[in-house]
Image (spheres, rainbow, N blue to C red):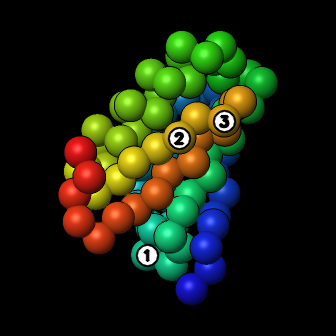
Amino acid sequence: MNLISAVQIGKSGISENLIETIKSHFKNHQNVKVVCLKNSKRDKNSIKAMAEEIISHLGNNYTYRVIGFTIIIKKWRKPKR
């Protein structure tokens, strides 16, 4: 099992397709790194809002951490939130 996988957010933003892609990455990985590209909204508040929206779609077993323009999402066995 690989530890980390990467997904990019572009100008289309957060869509159902992106959420399904992230869910499918968690079948084989423990962590997913979501990188916000330059043509998406690139300020700290909007990146934090995007992270909250992704986590709300995924569920209670996930936590996130924002580092620069990257969101690292971790899946836990038990609910953390």
Q: Position of residue 8 (x, y in %)?
A: 66, 44
Could you say whether the residue bearing mark 1 is in a helix, strand or loop? loop
Report the residue at 68% width, 18% height from top: 42
CA–CA distance between discs 3 and 2? 6 Å
Numbered circle sitting on residue 27: 1
Q: Position of residue 60 (x, y in %)?
A: 23, 51
Is 20 displayed left or right of 13 in the figure? left
Numbered circle sitting on residue 67: 3
Report the residue at 29% width, 70% height from top: 77
Could you say whether the residue bearing mark 3 is in a helix, strand or loop? strand
Q: Between 9 and 32, which is closer to the camera in this rendering?
A: 32
The residue singled out by tag 2 in the image is 65
Report the residue at 71% width, 30% height from top: 68
Please name the amino acid that badge 1 sits on. Answer: Lys
Above or below 10: residue 61: below
CA–CA distance between discs 3 and 1? 24 Å
In front of the other: label 3 or label 1?
A: 3
